[in-house]
Image (tube, rainbow, N blue to C red):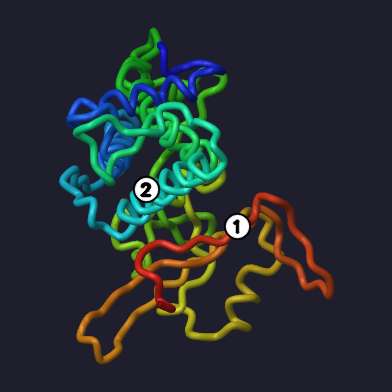
């Protein structure tokens, strides 16, 4: 019950931190473990939901390594945020609560306040990973009515926004969609960081409007596919380093906007739009 309710966001983040800090020697928690626990709870919730609703059973690998492009990018973001907070507190002379990690910690540890501020600022739906899992576990399997038939999926309590790992779909025939194989998102862990950013992305379904491996490498074709589309859009680009260094490093970058694309001579949009980058810097 602590993780549900209108004021449950910070309670959820605190519980996630306490779970992760059980494996640390100091008062902090390992950043990579915080990210991995949040991801695994979200993955488990999606898997249980697919069973409860008799949907296509998803393939689950709870042994995802923190070296994955998505999870590692989140870990690096958290550590960078914590470092900036400590430097800002040091130079300003203003103490930052629980910033100093107790002896036994390391430069891979973060404090509760650092984790909470990072999550609320950059990935607010990380706080939904625990309440989503709890609600699915205790409510989605007890939804039969008096006639023995399944009721609609239980609604989440007020103040709790569920986070779902998106499925990518594409039109097949009239009004029918099917799962769309894509070369961009090779696993759920690469979708997780984006799903944590905003409710529209965490809705559980992404509909593919354009893919270069299917529709061709044409900017005009891409624009004709998205112009006039009424929903939010996410542009994802996978970069590839095929230089002489002998290593092939890929990263994901792109942009999100919640407004409809239109042809206009002026700038337009709102504060919901953002750019993102996951993985090694392709320009470094």
Tell whether 149 sits left or right of 158. left
> Which residue, given by chain and number where applicable, does mark 2 sit on?
79
Q: How many marks?
A: 2
Q: Nearer the viewer, mark 2 or mark 1?
A: 2
- For mark 2, give the secondary structure: helix
Residue shown at 40% from the left, 57% from the top: 178
Q: Residue 104 is drawn in which quadrant?
A: top left
- For mark 1, give the secondary structure: strand
Name which of mark 2 and mark 1 comes first in the sequence.
2
Quadrant where the image shows the C terminus: bottom left
Observer-nearest of 267 and 158:
267
Residue 25: horizontal and vertical position, in percent?
17, 30
Q: Residue furthest bottom?
A: 244
Residue shown at 41% from the left, 51% from the top: 80
Q: Residue 241 is drawn in which quadrant?
A: bottom left
Residue 234: horizontal and vertical position, in percent?
54, 60
Above or below 159: residue 113: below
Tell me, yes or no, whether the two marked residues, 2 and 1, touch with CB atoms within 8 Å. Answer: no
Observer-nearest of 109 and 210:
109
Tell whether 41 sits left or right of 269. left
């Amino acid at each position: 019950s602590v993780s549900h309710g209108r004021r449950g966001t910070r309670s959820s983040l605190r519980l996630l931190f306490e779970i992760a800090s059980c494996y640390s020697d100091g008062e902090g928690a390992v950043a990579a473990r915080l990210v991995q626990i949040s991801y695994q709870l979200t993955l488990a919730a999606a898997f249980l939901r697919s069973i409860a609703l008799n949907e296509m059973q998803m393939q689950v690998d709870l042994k995802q390594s923190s070296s994955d492009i998505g999870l590692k990018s989140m870990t690096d973001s958290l550590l960078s945020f914590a470092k900036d907070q400590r430097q800002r507190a040091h130079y300003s002379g203003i103490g930052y609560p629980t910033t100093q990690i107790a002896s036994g910690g390391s430069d891979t540890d973060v404090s509760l306040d650092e984790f909470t501020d990072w999550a609320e600022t950059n990935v607010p739906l990380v706080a939904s990973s625990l309440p989503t899992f709890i609600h699915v576990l205790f409510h989605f399997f007890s939804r039969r009515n008096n006639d023995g038939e399944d009721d609609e999926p239980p609604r989440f309590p007020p103040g709790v926004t569920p986070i779902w790992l998106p499925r990518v779909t594409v039109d097949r025939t009239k009004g029918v969609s099917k799962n769309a194989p894509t070369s961009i998102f090779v696993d759920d862990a690469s979708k997780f960081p984006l799903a944590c950013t905003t409710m529209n992305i965490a809705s559980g379904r992404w509909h593919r409007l354009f893919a270069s491996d299917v529709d061709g490498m044409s900017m005009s074709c891409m624009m004709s596919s998205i112009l006039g589309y009424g929903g939010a859009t996410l542009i994802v680009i996978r970069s590839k380093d095929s230089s002489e260094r002998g290593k092939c490093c890929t990263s994901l970058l792109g942009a999100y906007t919640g407004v409809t694309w239109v042809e206009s001579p002026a700038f337009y949009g709102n504060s919901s739009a953002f750019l993102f980058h996951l993985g090694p810097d392709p320009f470094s």
